[in-house]
Image: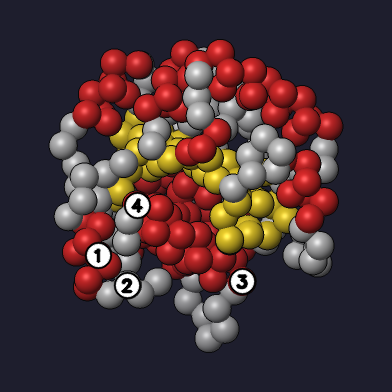
Amino acid sequence: MKLTKKTTDLINGKTAEPIIIGWTKGGIGKSLITLNAAIALHNAGINVRVADIDFQQTVYLTNIIRQKKELAALNVTSIKSEQQLRDFINEEFQGLTLIDIGGFDTPLNRLALKLAKHIILPFKGGAMVDDLGMLSFKKILNEEGISRDKFKVLLNQVHPRKTNLEPIKNEIKKDFPNFMNTVIHTSIEYDKQSKFAKGVTEIKAKVEPKSKLEIEALCQEILTIQGA
């Protein structure tokens, strides 16, 4: 991903506003998206940091492997307590702050949802478990008084051959009417790259895979959210 100097200077000169990618539902690809976005943004010259508060610590542990493999190291902090999260967010930092939350209901995840300026909500729809998870999530938002206005839905894990996305959008747009323009489709490239602690944007090929282009498009939208 190539960015102009004007864009990188603008983002790297702004105080970071916390952006969550995910919600309190596991298996939706939030850690994979966060990791790939962080890698793409970092390699494009953006000063990006990640708070990993997911108990699986996917982003944090992958970054350790990247360092051992002498790949470009990311700025990732493992967050285990509410005070640690508050301190992390309140720390002076210019650039982008991404937060990877756990796929379950905890006081730490609730605090992250309250403190985040923007929330990107990955959603694949079409499954009863998603419906039940969404009911629980909406209950959390109501209990914590969290506004739906800071949410944007990211259609994720969409079948490559699926062209009509309206049925998926209809499942969620009543409660979350704002959508990202980017759509992330399922791709074997994510698993292939993950085995080497790499992101899909680090694939070197004459023909760029669709997964790489989609992550780059998502990153451009994240930069727009941040004010680029």
Identify the residue position indicated by label 4 in the image: 226
**Residue at screen point 16% across, 37% down:** 92
Q: Give how far apart the Cα atoms at labels 4 and 1 are.
A: 12 Å
Looking at numbered disc 2 in the image, what kind of residue is underneath it? Leu
**Secondary structure at numbered mark 4:** helix
Q: Nearer the viewer, residue 170 or 206?
A: 170
Around disc 2, counting alpha carbons within 10 Å, would you say few (fewer than 14), some (14 to 19), or many (20 or more)?
few
Identify the residue position indicated by label 1 in the image: 8
- The vertical placement of 143 against 14, above or below, is above
Q: Are marks 2 and 1 in contact (CB under 8 Å)?
A: yes
Q: Give how far apart the Cα atoms at labels 2 and 1 are.
A: 7 Å
- The vertical placement of 31 against 37, above or below, is above
Query: Residue 188 got which mark?
Result: none
Q: Give how far apart the Cα atoms at labels 3 and 1 are.
A: 24 Å
Q: Are marks 4 and 2 in contact (CB under 8 Å)?
A: no
**Secondary structure at numbered mark 1:** helix
Query: Residue extending furthest bottom?
Result: 206
Residue 101 percent coordinates (x, y): 48, 31
Identify the residue position indicated by label 3 in the image: 210
**Residue at screen point 48% across, 38% down:** 150
**Secondary structure at numbered mark 2:** loop
**Residue at screen point 82% across, 51% down:** 167
Q: Which image quadrant is residue 131 in?
A: top right
Q: Give how far apart the Cα atoms at labels 2 and 3 are.
A: 19 Å
Looking at numbered disc 4 in the image, what kind of residue is underneath it? Gln
Foreground disc of the pair 2, 3: 2
Foreground disc of the pair 3, 4: 4
Q: Give how far apart the Cα atoms at labels 3 and 4 are.
A: 24 Å
Looking at numbered disc 1 in the image, what kind of residue is underneath it? Thr
Q: Give how far apart the Cα atoms at labels 4 and 2 are.
A: 15 Å
